[in-house]
Amino acid sequence: MVPRVSWLRLQPPFDQPVFALALQRAFAARSPPLLSLPEALSPQTRRALRRLAAPALEKFDFPDRGRYRIAKLTGGSEMPPPGSASARLRAATAPFLDELRDFAEVVSGARLRDGPAQIVSMGRGDYSLRLDDARARPGPAFVEVALDLSTGPHPFAATVYSQGPFSHLAVAQLPGQLTLARRSPESSRCDRYRSAIVGPRAFVLLRAAFPLAES
């Protein structure tokens, strides 16, 4: 059954246990397995996460990988200094990530381990390439969860999941949307270049990768 969570605050009807089996079937029916739930995350939770992340965001700019701002929630070789904005963000979001992993286990039907998580902010001129995804993935098989924390929609902004050279699926940017994707060694992901047409407002996304327990 879907766990009852407080931090996560999924919007009805996604917070109801009766929907657990329906979500599992919908997820497994796609090839590769992928599910997007519109308006699944409450505005209050989105606002709280944006405010927590804002002082911890750091610039990431490698032309062959991507350009954006990032705040790490888990992962990384160095722990942030005690009392820093990054340390406060990690401590505050730890229960949230546990609940998110539990929900991903319910929907995917797989046992998952903790993995890297971050909040990414993309403004005008920002992007991420498939090489960035390849360098950051936690292993060959995992479930990726993405939560759209943005304040408003962004025309033409999208995350593109690919399975091999011919299968491509663009997930549009919609505030409150929760997307789960089961990733295999053949899968890849990129975020479209944000040209001037998307406007000045940032696209804010929380991404967590949970490796399969047996992988």
Image (cartoon, helix red, strand yellow):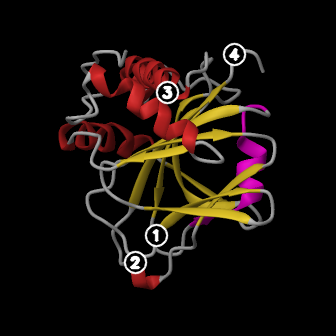
Q: Is 210 situated left or right of 202 in this image?
A: right
Question: Range of the magenta residues?
Answer: 127-139
Residue wearing tag 1: 157
Q: What is the C-alpha distance between the residues marked 3 and 2?
A: 30 Å
Query: Residue 205: percent from the left, percent from the top?
Result: 44, 49
Q: Earlier in the sequence, mark 2 or mark 1?
A: 1
Circle 3: residue type: Ala
Q: Is residue 138 magenta?
A: yes
69 or 204: nearer the viewer: 204
Residue wearing tag 2: 198
Q: Earlier in the sequence, mark 1 or mark 4?
A: 1
Circle 4: residue type: Ala
| Callout 2–callout 1 Cβ contact below 8 Å | yes
The residue under the point 80% across, 64% down is: 165
Q: Earlier in the sequence, mark 2 or mark 4?
A: 2
Q: Report crowding for label 2: few under 14, some 14 to 19, many 20 or more residues within 10 A (C-alpha).
A: some
Q: Is 34 situated left or right of 45 in this image?
A: right
Q: What is the C-alpha distance between the residues marked 3 and 1?
A: 24 Å
Label 3 residue SS: helix
Circle 2: residue type: Val
Residue wearing tag 3: 104
Label 2 residue SS: helix
Number of numbered discs visible in the structure rendering: 4
Q: Is 152 situated left or right of 86 in this image?
A: left
Foreground label between 3 and 1: 3
Query: Residue 18: percent from the left, percent from the top?
Result: 28, 22
Q: Is residue 88 visible?
A: no
Query: Residue 178: percent from the left, percent from the top?
Result: 40, 43
Q: Earlier in the sequence, mark 4 or mark 3?
A: 3
